[in-house]
Every structure is written in C-alpha cells, then in structure tokens.
Image (cartoon, helix red, strand yellow):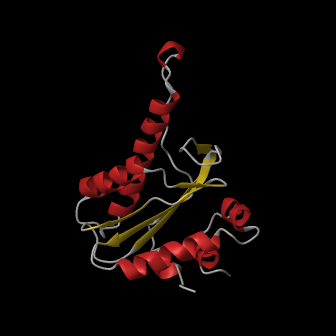
Amino acid sequence: MVRLSPYLQKGFIRFELETRVDPPEEEDYDPIKHVARVKEALIGEIADLLSATGHVANRNKLFLDLWNREKKASTAVGHGIAIPHIRTRQVKDVLLGFARSTEGYEFAAPDGEKVHFFVVIVGPSFDPDMYLKIYKAVAEMFRYDGVREKLADTWTEGEIYRLFDGK
C-alpha cells in the first residue's frame, strides 16, 4: 500500500473549512445553482490551500482545472467524503490535501449526504501511475472502520499523517 503522508505536506491540512455561501432569498432559490455556488467556492478554498505552499505554478489555472473537473461529475463519493482530483500542468509532483467541515457542505453526493471530508489529489499530467495509486489508497483508507470518526476527532497534523498511513 502507498504511504500517503509524504504527499500530504505541511500546510496541506485545514481542520475547518471557512467557505460560507448563504442561500439566496426563498423566491430565487434554486438548489442546483446553490450547490454549484458552494462547490465553486470550496474548490477555490482548496486551490488557495494548495497554492499557498508554493508547490503550484498558477493558482487560478489550478482552480479552473479543478472546477472544470468538478463540473463534469461530482467528486463526492458518499458517506460524507469528496475526493476532488485532477492531473494538471500546474504541479510537478503529486500533492495531497485534506480539509474538513464539522457542519458539512451540500456537494451533490450520490447518497445525498453533506460532505465533511475533502481529500484533494493534484498530480502532474505526465505521471498518471502515481496519481492513480494515490487515488486508490485514499479510497481504500475510507473503507476501514472508524477512519471518518478519527479524522473528525483529531486536531493535530501528526495524527492526520498517521491516519493517512493506516496507523
């Protein structure tokens, strides 16, 4: 199994997402448009998180790559989890980011649940093998009993690293 912690570097973890998108007035409320606005704002926050570390060539292009991918199909996989992912020219190495939300966000999940955990995977266009191995390892990580509960309860980066390495 791939160790995930080397790709989850310092600064790639956000314990509480800050994005807030208020729904419009009742008469103008369109749930599909509202979810799209929420998703766009969250993808922006995720792009900010990764680009603040200096590992991203162009934050705006990364945002557009992630947002265009999200518009094709939701990266929410159910059970409160979303895995936004993209291969892009904006990075030289695979980057892994983790963010969570206590309250959760509407993110067009297949089970209709709010998403509380976001694991973003950004890989270079020229290296599909490692990108796919990391995606598989992330998906498998959430299959273990108690992982979501432990991720919700931890407040240290060290504990996040251990959980991402299956310990």
Q: Place residue 141 in its image quadrant.
A: bottom right
**Please, which residue is most extreme toward the bottom here?**
1
**Please, which residue is most extreme toward the right here?**
145
Please give the name of the residue rendered at 39% of the width and 50% of the height, measured from the top-left corner.
Answer: 72
Q: Nearer the viewer, residue 135 or 13?
A: 135
Q: Which of 19 and 3 is in front in this view?
A: 3
Q: Nearer the viewer, residue 159 or 149?
A: 149
Q: Where is residue 18 in the image (x, y as percent from the top left)?
A: 50, 45
Q: Where is residue 159 in the image (x, y as percent from the top left)?
A: 64, 73
Please give the name of the residue rendered at 61% of the width and 52% of the height, measured from the top-left corner.
Answer: 116
Please give the name of the residue rendered at 65% of the width and 48% of the height, measured from the top-left corner.
Answer: 111
Location of the C terminus (image quadrant): bottom right
Q: Position of residue 29 (x, y in %)?
A: 50, 21
Please give the name of the residue rendered at 59% of the width and 75% of the height, measured from the top-left corner.
Answer: 164
Q: Which of 48 and 82 is in front in this view?
A: 82
> Is 53 located above or below residue 17 in the figure?
below
> Is 87 located above or below residue 48 in the figure?
below
* Badge count: 0
